[in-house]
Amino acid sequence: MSSPALYLTHLIAAVAALAWGVGVHADPLPKHLRDTGLDESRNLSFSPQYPLWSDGAHKRRWIYLPPGTAIDASRPDAWEFPPGTRLWKEFSLTGPVETRFIERLPDGTWRYAAYVWNEERTDATLAPSEGIAALPTHDGYSIPSESDCRACHESAAVPVLGFSALQLSSDRDSLAPHADALTDIDLGGLVARGLIKNLPPGSTRPRIDASWQIERASLGYLHGNCGHCHNETDTRVPVDLTLAQSVIAGSAGSDRVLRSLLNVRSRFLARVSSRNPQKQMPPLGTRHIDVEALALLERWISEKSSTTEESKP
Amino acid sequence: MNRLKQTCVWPVTGMFLLGAITLATEPARAADSDAAKVARGKYLVTTSACNDCHTPWHVGPAGPEPDMSRMLSGHPESLVINQPATLPAGPWTLAAAPTNTAWSGAWGVSFTANLTPDAETGLGKWTQATFMQAIRTGRHMGRGRQILPPMPIAMYRNFTDEDFGAIFAYLRSIPPIKNRVPEPLPPGATAAAVEK
């Protein structure tokens, strides 16, 4: 090959390599869950105290942080996860149905996937990015699309929703609907193991500021099920309704939630108690009303409304 | 020495002048850029048939036409529709209200959205990102219920980021109109039955 042709070949190869390396995920998503790095014996399992309602599915969760890295908790409501962070959430009915996976990439972006278990429960394979509307083996159970994953996870201050200061607080809420028992570790344990840095001193036991237990559990449920879209970040839905809690001292989270919620309480309860797809809240990931939580919210809102009415001059 | 002074002073003076000119022209350039973006957005909106459904139609002197006094304000809240249409026998699959803003089909009844920048009933509180996510995902506000037919999501999701930016800039520039569009009705429903 003549030297100009060789030079041109090298130039094309260099440009192609550069194009491939910029803005493109380093590796495609593995086809099998087992190749994502999930190792139940080595990854940390965790359980948020205010879990998302998933029609009664039993859930298990794990996190992996690259060796030598830690989560930066300088912003208490928006932790900074190191590139390479991976999280898994397994959904089970009579057995595992799907395992969802999110990963932070070297460029700081996140990617999302779902793996569907076979009937023998021996293998889980990557679902199509457009999701699966109804699994024939599980009574219409649906697998979310990638855009559905982003819809909820990227409306919040940080896309990791169940692994935060409030969700992992050592001061667990005993009335929180559907909460699993504490697993491997809580916030204090994470700090002690050096996996979280820059957490403000004395803040390993954040607790929702509420006047009674029902209120605390209600606010926690709203935070875990609605707060990822209804919050005060720039990426929130354009609706005047704040249901997310803050662990920053003095943020008066309960007052703020109450003010916005009581104005729309009848419409709010109508949506929470509906599974008409055009009306229901949450709009994604559920086909069955959360009866236990609905009763809790109705009781809290009813008592709060009467108190508010009584206090009017 | 004088020559040295001249050598140093003139380039410095030139840099200041250049900086001053740049600063003076920057706002004008930005305004031109914004105007061009809005103009591009208007072009896309008017050639992509947005007014066909999001502006209520009325019968004008020359026949049915979009009522531009209600431009892009969506289905008029004054035109109350409680149930889906009953279609006649034959190969018919959908029916439209005379305003062309309500559509009845297998999905129930859909009402076109208020795209004006009214803060309470339109897109006034939306961000460009929300607008883009809504079209790309086919979900209301980018994360809510499905956006229903006849909205051609499958086509419009192919707009580029720049297109979405231009369209949103134009929609922010038009007059706000207060008009609260109703929620969609499911198939076979009446307004009372929709509550559950």
Image: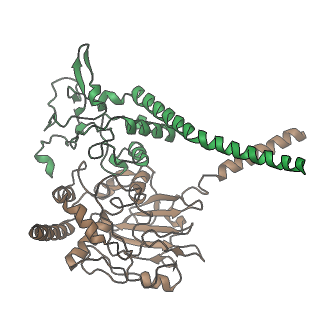
Q: Is residue A263 above or below residue A3?
A: below
Q: Would residue B188 appear left or right of A190 to someone viewing this image?
A: left
Q: Residue at x 27, y 30 (%)?
A: B70
Q: Colour of chain A?
A: brown
| Residue in view at x 43 percent, y 45 percent | B128
Q: Is residue B131 visible?
A: yes
**Camera-side residue of B24 and A78:** B24
**To which quarter of the image does residue B56 belong?**
top left
Q: Is residue A132 left or right of residue A26?
A: left
Residue B158 in sight from this viewpoint: no
Q: Quadrant of residue A175?
A: bottom left
Residue B121 picture location, percent across and down: 26, 44
Left-right relation of B87 to A216: left
Q: Is residue A12 above or below residue A146?
A: above
Q: Position of residue B64 (x, y in %)?
A: 25, 19
Residue B137 at x, y percent in the picture = 40, 46
In the rendered image of this protein, which colour is used for chain B? green
Relative to the observer, which residue lies in front, A237 or A24? A237
Coloured how?
by chain
In the rendered image, the vertical position of residue B134 relative to residue B95, given as above or below? below
* Furthest residue toward front: B2
Q: Position of residue A58 (x, y in %)?
A: 32, 70
Q: Residue at horizontal 87%, vertical 39%?
A: A4
How many numbered callouts? Answer: 0
